Amino acid sequence: MASCEKYWADSNSNPDLYRNLIATRNCTPEEQAGPDAEACPKCGRLAIHIYCHECMNCGFKSKNSESEL
């Protein structure tokens, strides 16, 4: 599973704090995807993860995910 970009930023890249945030909060697909996320053509949410290019809401894989393998 991709990281939650919002919680990673909130933790200031501290892995221990990040794990605590993940354990105590529920991030939305938009928060997980990151601030520069793209809209998903399948579900319409701004939830295409900025690094793995997969929708954090419905699992749609964008064509960009294949070009980086």
Image (cartoon, rainbow, N blue to C red):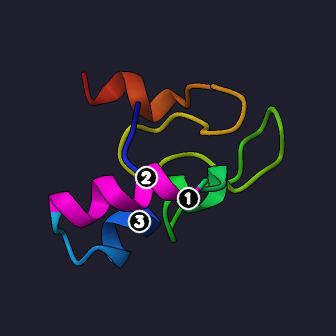
Q: Residue at x 33, y 27 (%)?
A: 67
The tag earlier along the polypeptide, 2 or 3, is: 3
Q: Quadrant of residue 55?
A: top right
Residue annotated with mark 1:
25
Secondary structure category for the residue under label 3: helix
> In the image, is residue 19 part of the stretch drawn in magenta?
yes
Q: Left or right: where does residue 54 sit relative to residue 8?
A: right
x and y, in percent, of residue 21 in the image: 41, 61
57 w.r.t. 21: above or below: above
SS of the residue under disc 1: loop
- Kindly indicate whether the residue at mark 1 contacts the one at mark 3 (C-beta within 8 angstroms): yes
Q: Quadrant of the N terminus?
A: top left
Q: What span is colored magenta in the figure?
A: 15-25
The amino acid on which the numbered mark 1 sits, given as a three-letter code, is Arg
Callout 3 amino acid: Tyr
- For marks 3 and 1 on the same chain, the one whose residue lies earlier in the sequence: 3
Horizontal and vertical percent for residue 34?
49, 62
Residue 38: x, y in percent? 61, 55
Question: Residue 37: horizontal and vertical position, in percent?
Answer: 55, 59
Dots 2, 3 in contact, CB < 8 A: yes
Mark 3 to mark 1: distance in Å? 9 Å
What residue is disc 2 on? 22
Quadrant in which residue 8 is drawn = bottom left
| Residue named by callout 3 | 7
